[in-house]
Amino acid sequence: MKKLPIELTINGRAHELLVSPKETLLNVLRERFHLTGAKYGCGIGECGACTVLLDGLPVLSCQLLAVMCNGKKVVTIEGLSPQEAAAHPMQDSFVEEGAVQCGFCTPGMVISATALVEEKSEPTTEDIKVALRGNLCRCTGYENIIRAVKTGARKMKEV
Amino acid sequence: MKIPSGKVFRNDAYAKVTGKAKYSDDLKFFNMAHAVPVYSDYIHAENLQVDTGAAEKSAGVLKVITAADVPGSIRFGQIDQDYCMFAEKKIMCAGDVVALVVAEQRSQALSAAEKVVISADPLPVVSDPEAALSPESPIVREIENSNLMNHHKMRRGDAPQELKNCDIVLQEEFSTQFIEHAYMEPESAVCVPRQDGVMEVYGSMQHPFSTRRFVGALLGEPLSHIEVYQPPTGGGFGGKDDTAAIVCARAALAARLLNRPVKLTYTREWSIRESYKRHPYRLNYKVGIEKSGRVKAVQVRMISDGGPYLSVSPWVNWRSTAQCFGPYTVDNVHADVLCVATNNPVTGAMRGFGAPQVNFAVEQISDIAAERLGISPLEYRRINMVKQDGETVTGQVLDTHTVSMEQVMDRVAGEIAYEEKLGRCSRGTSEGDELYGVGLSISYRGSSLGAEGMDFCSSVINCQFDGSILLETGIHENGQGAESVMLMLLAEQLGVRLDRIKYKRSSTSNVPDGGTTVATRGTIMGGGAVTAAVQKLKQLMADNLYDVLQCRPEEVRFADDHVLGPDSDSKITWDEAMQHLFLKRVYPYAFGSFQAPDVSWDEETGQGDAYFTYVYSCQAVELTVNKSTGKIKLQNVVAAHDIGRAVNRAMVLGQMYGGITQGIGMALSEDLEIENGKFAHLDLNHYKIPKARELPEMTGIIVENPDPQSPSKAKGIGEPALELIAPAIANAVYNATGIRYRDMPLKVNPEDLK
Ligand code: FES
Ligand code: FES
């Protein structure tokens, strides 16, 4: 199969690469760039474990062909924090509020939550539940996650 | 050192929120090949023929492995050695794997897998457990002459006789469904042959030691030749034992045959297809009650669907037997719990382990009985529940810990204003479109394995001369925060700063087999082992430091990151203590082990001290049912559990909410549609686990009556949280609609409400 050239900016760095037409963004991130924070949980757009930011908006990378991302900016959980050394306030909040159990849904949850707060700085519980409708978690019952998003929103305002 | 309460501590949280945590599928090794499984379209068939010729020639293919390539035993299991890791001559169920294709790249393995040609002669599919018991039914397992795989009994007093003399006799039937664990991370394994001949296994699993046994069996190699590491596991809930271990075993076989690293990662589809499920139960109860409200006799028959392999069904069924009438004292009980072989998916361990099914029935019966008696549901429960120094249905006297059944129930009833709200329930009529109901249920749960398992666990504390400490236990991190709890217990008991301690990455070649981290035994057993090791370490340190502290060995204390004498003037820092020990050439190293207190069981009568302690729980829910759609909307859940002592509060609450949520899924939405052994769907689109939007507000109450049976005073929360919300919901739906739903998942047909 013929490979196609694309340009992708991943976590602030520009890359040129050849992808096969059927390759998903999730595959490119995990297999070529070893950015394994985005997870495969279902492959059909049901779980949200593969969520990353594409030009600032949350997308399901398992549902997106890499070729369609040509020229776009991708941010993964590994690149969410602007500073290398410190975690993003939303990441801190997830830790503090006990929102992490097995952690498999966590990167996707944090990405969706951050995107929500970027858009709406003081989300209500309902806003959060709506924003997380595409993110499944089997461990936490979402309670502590919702709390973490609220705390995260407060922290993001402070910085 | 005290951990500030209310603060969460998790040693793995930052790695997980930043995406740095490496789960099994995130690992890569040089020269790694990829394997994929091949399934057949048969459910039950014989004369299996597998033609791998075309697949072998496919691009990039290194090998196609079938039963013929297995050097060790094809079959293995935790109780019976019957679980087929590669189908040999027969297909027994939809999840049977006939071959493993290994290729340079995963995409190559996937396309080659389609070229494996499978043929077999179909056999009749046995799919109804009840029918499977009739003498005319075809036999599923050749090794046996009936489809009855297991039968547990309880014979206490004379229930059939006593039932004749009761004022009220209820006869009730309930059913529950197959439940998928639906851990977010599908199974994955990476196996790496090491130059010293050892096979390294990295896998998503719950039990590295069990995995090691499966791998050893398939490879035909001793346990010492296999070293299993457990990377972070993306959820287990009891589901990552047999199947996950078999995935590791197959990857190991490929790695051994090719002599290079092999990764085998499951798709969601394969995961649902092959992994074992929660047993569906049919439960028939006859309950005899006196006018006073006392239950006099219970006769029950439960039939569970075991699928074609035994797995741990007898243990699951055993819990259903030992707790066959919930947390109530009854003098006459006649119980039969059967497990039947079918060609349906294999069933095995799942969080709750044979209790959620029983509770679903028993706690609805409680409400039905109260109504018949004309007393409040709380009153009925109060009359019959286990009390301090009272007896369980197994004849166990509960005198070794605080029996807090009533305390826990009262906390929940008070918090949710149960009695008052009960009066406001719609019972089928309301002015608006919504019917309102409140419902409650209680349970007790035997901690740890109980009389059916070997229950012991160990721990190693290895203090370094620079003041840092390494801790290891035989308990494993499944995402529930087990390592963090062990670290906190050690810091607290040794009086040292938490950041001194590192949890040592565990491997099966280091610490001895600590048993599987199931049955809510992590905290109690691992904590017991840590406590034992700490005691030894303190003794060793006291014997070698008392002269420095100018006191007697028994006066040496450990607190505030110091080792102290009887008064606070004589003290040395932890670092100084380590230097002293170094100069004395003494290793500050201790191995501790904890054996669960004795339990007992009589197979014929089902009597004995089933568990060494119990967790007491109550959950209640408020909900509405829409008259025109039948949709059930949960509004509010309150839960209280007496777990002895909460070591990591926020994590306990997190486990509680997570467990309740899984229970809600079971009650309302989760249904693996299996028709004649075949899955209707293999995705999370149709199998609906709860989403944030469908969940109510939840309030968790932690009740703490420190348990003397547990060295750390703590019990566990993993399973109690899940096992009783479903009947509370069913009771609330009844109180809303006036209709009793006895089958899970509960579906209200709006026609019925007219
Ligand atoms: S893996 Fe992309 S949504 Fe599940
Ligand atoms: S923490 Fe395990 S799936 Fe969310």
Image: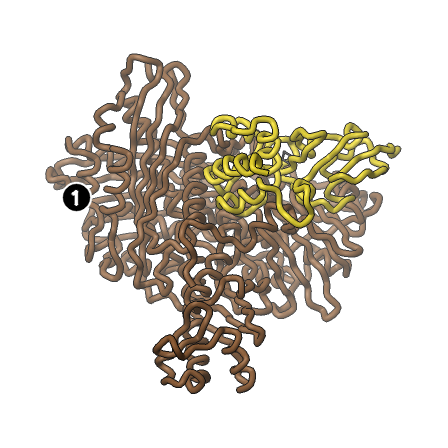
Residue A16, can we see it? yes
The quarter of the image holding the N terminus of chain B is bottom left
Q: Position of residue A34 (x, y in %)?
A: 74, 47
Task: Please tell me how many numbered marks the rendered image carries.
Answer: 1
Instruction: Using the image, determine if residue B282 lies above or below residue B422.
Output: below
Q: Position of residue B599 (x, y in %)?
A: 32, 63
Write down the colour of chain A.
yellow
For residue B186, side relative to residue A65 (left or right): left
Q: Name the residue beneath numbered marker 1.
A: B383
Q: Residues within 10 Å of mark 1 (few under 14, many from 20)?
A: some
Instruction: Using the image, determine if residue B126 lies above or below residue B551.
Output: above
The quarter of the image holding the C terminus of chain B is top left
Which of these two is toward me, B507 or B145?
A: B507
- What residue is shown at x 67% (from left), y 35% (from top)? A52
Quadrant location of residue B108?
top right
Q: Position of residue A83 (x, y in %)?
A: 68, 45
- What residue is shown at x 26% (from left), y 55% (from top)? B394
Residue B125, can we see it? no
Colour theme: by chain
Instruction: Using the image, determine if residue B385 lies above or below residue A45.
Output: below
Name the outermost residue toward the left.
B292
Q: Secondary structure at mark 1?
A: helix
Instruction: Using the image, determine if residue B462 lies above or below residue B452.
Output: below
